[in-house]
Amino acid sequence: MPSLGEQIAALPMKFDKTGKLRVLMVTSRDTGRWVMPKGWEMDGKKPWAAAEIEALEEAGAKGHVGKTEIGFYHYPKRLDDGTELRCRVRVYPLIVDKLSRDWKERKQRKRKWFSPRDAARRVDEPELSDLLLTLCDAPHKLPLISALLS
């Protein structure tokens, strides 16, 4: 068993009608806390492609995923045997074009759009909160996000 688990996540985002950035969060299946769509890397898939699949399965979000991570965070993952594994999660931006009404985990999770500041207040992981707060000021000027928008 590795001492550090490596996971990937998508941060689904869009700009609303007033030009403000919104991020899509989902509830975790076990505790119901707000998280990003995330999971383990997938054999034969690039990490950003795996993150894109997680966004579709967990949130029904489709769009354009960035191939460069916008950051990472750590959290303790509770395993089936009750032990905890410290995980490092690499986060990839996903500009959402469409939300599916019918998606794989729709009966297990809720999804909701938040401002980055509101999302940062709702997550348990301090590093994830800090990452979300970096999106509060002029997110369209961040190179990784502006490249996805063009």
Image: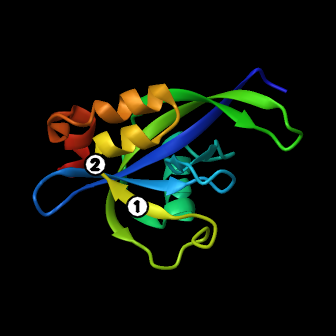
Looking at this view, is 79 or 3 the one in front?
A: 79
**Image disc number at residue 66:** none
Kindly give the residue lying farthest to the right in the view shown. Answer: 81
Q: Quadrant of residue 140?
A: top left
Please, what is the three-letter code of the amino acid marked with disc 2? Ser
Which residue position is annotated with label 2?
Answer: 115
- Compare residues 65 and 107 and report the one nearer the observer: 107
The amino acid pointed to by label 1 is Lys
Question: Looking at the picture, how far across and down is residue 70, in whole percent?
Answer: 37, 32
Mark 2–mark 1 Cα distance, whole angstroms, equals 10 Å
Q: Position of residue 28 (x, y in %)?
A: 60, 53
| Quadrant showing the N terminus | top right
Residue 79 x %, y %: 80, 39
Identify the residue under disc 1. 112
Horizontal placement of 24 versus 48: left or right?
Answer: left
Q: From this viewpoint, which residue is outermost toward the top?
A: 3
Q: Is residue 86 visible?
A: yes
Residue drawn at point x = 46 percent, y = 37 percent: 91
Q: Residue at x 51, y 33 (%)?
A: 90
